[in-house]
Amino acid sequence: DADVTQTPRNRITKTGKRIMLECSQTKGHDRMYWYRQDPGLGLQLIYYSFDVKDINKGEISDGYSVSRQAQAKFSLSLESAIPNQTALYFCATSDLNTNYGYTFGSGTRLTVV
Amino acid sequence: GQQLNQSPQSMFIQEGEDVSMNCTSSSIFNTWLWYKQDPGEGPVLLIALYKAGELTSNGRLTAQFGITRKDSFLNISASIPSDVGIYFCAGVDGANSKLTFGKGITLSVRP
């Protein structure tokens, strides 16, 4: 099994729908992150959490929310999806012992039509 | 916010050639990292650099942490087809303990 698992891998949804992307990890890491990747724009940080009771906004948090249900689980929600949220979404984990070496999931490709 | 600059956006090389990629910033970073993303997968850490001037190798890959702490480069020697992918640089400034990523360079290797 993968260390960082994202579900679903692919999703097509309609404008205005609420959608949740899930991330779970078996690394035992405290820190979890959600990134968005668009062609030519690199990886943009949406939200991050340094432990279960900690939630922080990243560069592009508008239109998104997160929930850290447990140390191993961090979900990203789009409350009302819009077409420009069509992108590849990555979850990542780290902790102080990894010296910033993040472990990424395989990504969720989201299309909003 | 902080930005890391990677250019060009795409590079095309012949199999067997060496290639060098730079990453620059107007801000100082205390840690530099290089990641590679294969098609359909998440980025994977290639090399991490923790000290100014540090030169580190990982097989055919060599990376250096610039003396000014505002740049880093990654060299790939004797390229092979599986080197195809997107190469990201990333930096940590120590103040917020989060990575800042460059926009990535897409590398294509012609057989």
Image: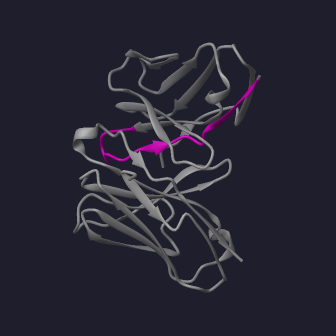
Q: In which quarter of the view is residue A71 placed?
A: bottom left
User: How far across and how far down the image is residue B108, in percent?
Assistant: 72, 31
Count of numbered badges drawn on the protein: 0
User: How far across and how far down the image is residue A73, in percent?
Assistant: 32, 66
Please report the residue visible at 41 percent of the width from the left and 31 percent of the height from the top.
Answer: B32
Q: Quadrant of the C terminus of chain B?
A: top right
Residue B43 in the magenta stretch? The answer is: no
Q: In which quarter of the view is residue A83 placed?
A: bottom right
The one nearer the camera, B52 or A40, is: A40
User: How far across and how far down the image is residue A102, in percent?
Assistant: 38, 44
Quick check: A87 left or right of A99?
Answer: right
Quick check: A41 left or right of A30?
Answer: right
Furthest toward the front, the residue is A1
Colour basis: one colour
The one nearer the camera, B14 or A36, is: B14
Residue B108 in the magenta stretch? The answer is: yes
Residue A83 to residue B12: above or below: below
Please report the residue visible at 59 percent of the width from the left and 40 percent of the height from the top.
Answer: B38
Range shown magenta? B92-110
Residue A74 to residue B93: above or below: below
Please report the residue visible at 69 percent of the width from the left and 13 percent of the height from the top.
Answer: B16
User: How far across and how far down the image is residue A51, in percent?
Assistant: 23, 61
Quick check: A91 left or right of B103?
Answer: left
Q: In which quarter of the view is residue A50 placed?
A: bottom left
Residue A69 to residue A106: above or below: below
Furthest toward the bottom, the residue is A16
Residue A104 to residue A112: above or below: above
